[in-house]
Amino acid sequence: MKKHLFKLKYIVLGALVSLTACVSDDLPEVGDLADITGPQPFYSYVDVSTSSFDCNDVELEANYDYFFQAGTNLAVNGTQYEWVVIPSENVNLINKDKPVLELQIEAELATVVALEEEIAKAEFKVPCESDPAKLAVLEQQIADFEVQLAAAEAAVSDETKANVAALEAEMAALPAATLEDRELIFEFPGPGEYTVGLTVTDNLGKSDYTEKIVVVNQAIPTIAIPEIGEAGFEAGDLFDGSGDGRDSWRSPSSSKWGSVFQINTKSELGVLPEGYKAAKFPSDGTRVGYQEIDVTPGATYVISYFSSLDPGASGDLTVSIVNPNADNIEEARLEANILAFKTEDNASSTQDVFKKSAITFEAGELEKVIILISNSGTESRVDAFDITVKL
């Protein structure tokens, strides 16, 4: 093998020599050609903005930060970068490593940071909570978290403190970001359109320029995820630690809607999709589950749940999302009042086997909707409701 490679090297070298011998400096336009390949600049950016709003969707603060990364087609030649932003007034530059160091500090203080976030979540709800009982629970939660936070801060080891101090010193020593950095963060002063240009120059002095219009959008509140009370039908799941697993599912009138469902209990985990309990609907169809939840007008949601229907006599289970204008179960079954629904029968069901289903619905102009569960013909069970915002 070495022998063949040795020969191959000389064959290639000989070819190069032959080609060089063919070049005559006496002929015009022949010889070493000038390198005419210049840099072709491009860049990408990612929105890393942050914002916060109060419970009335009033903006408290917003940072319009965008991470920019320059690139070029040149893989070998040295390059220089130069950014330009128009308009440039009040546009600040941030070193790309600052957020990384901040995250590392948070990781060192993970327990402390987690408790601070729990306190912030509870404090967020306080100003807009009108129920005295819920307000009392929130205030007690905050007090409990503050005790835990003080203990967590006291338990921070000397080693962790030293690591945090080193990271803070590293962050303080970071050089200021400049318009010549290949990667940097632009902190825009507010929403609007900005022209961001990039000039790339190679080590031969050749350069080229590219630009884009970057649209910085106004910060908007995150769509709140509605709360489904006692979604897993477990005891003690209400905000104050009470509840029998179905208190959130009682209709305003049993004569208009039907009696609340029963509870099916298992002694071992893993038998039911979640916990030890599930909602149970007898085959006579007299039991229902009824719960109003808050929604954001204009938002789209996905509700998921697990269900199991006994095989045997023909029967079905229906979960509906209903307009709260419906005053009874008959009105709730009118097409005009149904936002979305899913009905499943027991034609292919297996005893005690749960199947996951999902329903997508649009809130439209509504601020509340009803989740309605009903069945007929066969005993049915439901467990583990969940709801997400569809982006």
Image: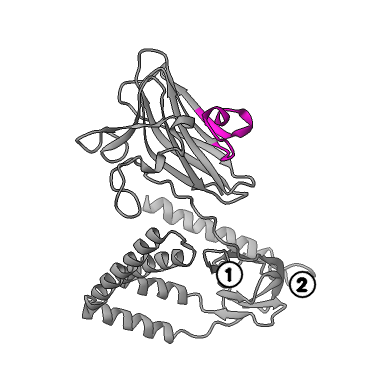
**What kind of element bears circle 2?**
loop
What color scheme is it? one colour
Give the distance between the C-alpha atoms of the residues marked 2 and 1, in whole angstroms: 75 Å
Which residue, as the protein is rendered here, is positioned at the far left? 267
From the viewer's perspective, is residue 222 above or below residue 104?
above
Which class describes the residues within 10 Å of circle 2: few (<14), some (14-19), or many (20+)? few
Q: Which disc number belongs to residue 279? A: none
Instruction: State which region is magenta.
Output: 322-342
In depth, the one of 79 and 77 nearer the eye is 79
According to the picture, the residue beneath numbered tag 1 turns out to be 59
Res 306 → quadrant: top left
Q: Is residue 336 magenta?
A: yes
Q: Residue at 37% across / 82% down in the picture? A: 168
Q: Residue at 32% across / 41% down in the picture? A: 245
What is the total number of numbered labels drawn onto the structure image? 2
In depth, the one of 379 and 194 nearer the eye is 379
In depth, the one of 305 and 296 nearer the eye is 296
Q: Which disc number belongs to residue 26? A: 2
Q: Which amino acid type is shown beneath numbered disc 2?
A: Asp
Q: Is residue 361 magenta?
A: no
From the viewer's perspective, is residue 387 above or below residue 354?
below
In depth, the one of 222 and 319 nearer the eye is 319
Residue 232 locus on image (x, y percent): 34, 41
Residue 207 locus on image (x, y percent): 69, 75
Which class describes the residues within 10 Å of circle 1: few (<14), some (14-19), or many (20+)? some
Residue 155 locus on image (x, y percent): 21, 75
Q: Which amino acid type is shown beneath numbered disc 1?
A: Glu
Instruction: Specify whether residue 183 is in view.
Output: no
Residue 316 locus on image (x, y percent): 44, 21
**What kind of element bears circle 1?**
strand
